[in-house]
Image (cartoon, rainbow, N blue to C red):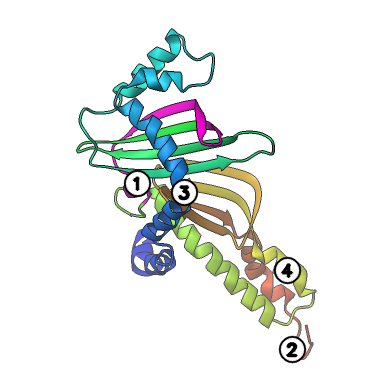
Amino acid sequence: MFLLFLRACALPALFCMLAGCQQSDLIKDFEQKVPLQDQQLARHYSDLLREKQLDYVRMATEPGNNGDQIRQALSTLSAAFPAGEPRSVKVVGYQRIEQRDAPQLLSVSFEYAYPEKWIVSTIVLRKYGTDATIMGLSVAPQTASLEQQATFTLRGKSLLHYVVLGAAILSPLLILSALVLCLRSKLTVRKWPWLLFISIGFGQLSLNWATGQYLFLPIAIQLFGVAAGTSAYQPWTFTVSLPLGAIVFLLVRQKLAAPAGLMA
């Protein structure tokens, strides 16, 4: 019955909410914000690693990283790339840290698309003007593109996904209903403490929609009992809280109601 309700009533409402946050729009905005110079600089070293030109990569690393250990690490990273040219390469991650009187720190990730797999290569650079040294490298094979992983879908989801999804829809609706009832009711007590209590959710359960990983925080509060967010190439994350104030108010509302003719 719960899953039937989600499919028939709650999910259409959720899809209307998600429609205002299309993944393609987020990706387009992200790509426009990544400086072309930083992309080209990081891509140069990432392609050298893919093309197994490891001596050039090793010479660009931080001083002191030129021993046998770095050679073995670069060889292992390079071996993760399939043979041949990728079908496409696009930037999927970017972070820049600027410090006064210090070099910039850049972290740029690229996704290489091959016929049977995808490779995410991340390059961390210490940038000195137009020059840079490599601080770190990582290569992570993927079974699907990051854009596909970030797409919201119900296919293959567990019961926990449906529970969190239902709570993300029902919790704010319950809070909104209780707030409206509180505002319109004549009570024998002050309303503002109840309005504050109702509007807050207690505890937090966060779920990564793509991976199914979750985090529960028993001591936490959240306004309106729900939060949802995503970004370019990142999956949706839903965070729900127990609408304790709304539940308590609905249970005791009749006892708090003022007698007929008495103003709240």
Q: Secondary structure at mark 3?
A: loop
Q: Amino acid at mark 3?
A: Val
- Distance CA(mark 2)–CA(mark 1): 57 Å
For discs 1 and 4, the disc positioned in front in the rendered view: 1
Residue 254, how many percent across, how many down?
Answer: 68, 76
Is residue 145 shown left or right of residue 138?
Answer: left
* Structural crowding at the residue carrying mark 1, measured as other residues with C-alpha within 10 Å and reported as few (<14), some (14–19) or many (≥20): some
* Structural crowding at the residue carrying mark 4, measured as other residues with C-alpha within 10 Å and reported as few (<14), some (14–19) or many (≥20): some
For discs 4 and 3, the disc positioned in front in the rendered view: 3
Residue at the spot of label 1: 149
Q: Amino acid at mark 4?
A: Trp
- Distance CA(mark 1)–CA(mark 4): 41 Å
Q: Nearer the viewer, residue 90 or 170?
A: 90
Residue at the spot of label 4: 194
**On-image quarter of the C terminus:** bottom right
The residue under the point 77% across, 91% down is 261
Magenta stretch: give its range.
126-150
Question: Who comes first in sequence, dot 2 or dot 1?
Answer: 1
Question: Who comes first in sequence, dot 1 or dot 4?
Answer: 1
Residue at the spot of label 2: 260
Residue 143 drawn in magenta? yes
Residue 181 drawn in magenta? no
Q: Quadrant of residue 68?
A: top left
CB contact under 8 Å: marks 2 and 4: no
Q: Amino acid at mark 2?
A: Ala
Q: Secondary structure at mark 1?
A: helix
Q: Amino acid at mark 1?
A: Gln
Residue at the spot of label 3: 34
Question: Looking at the picture, does residue 106 appear above or below residue 69?
Answer: below
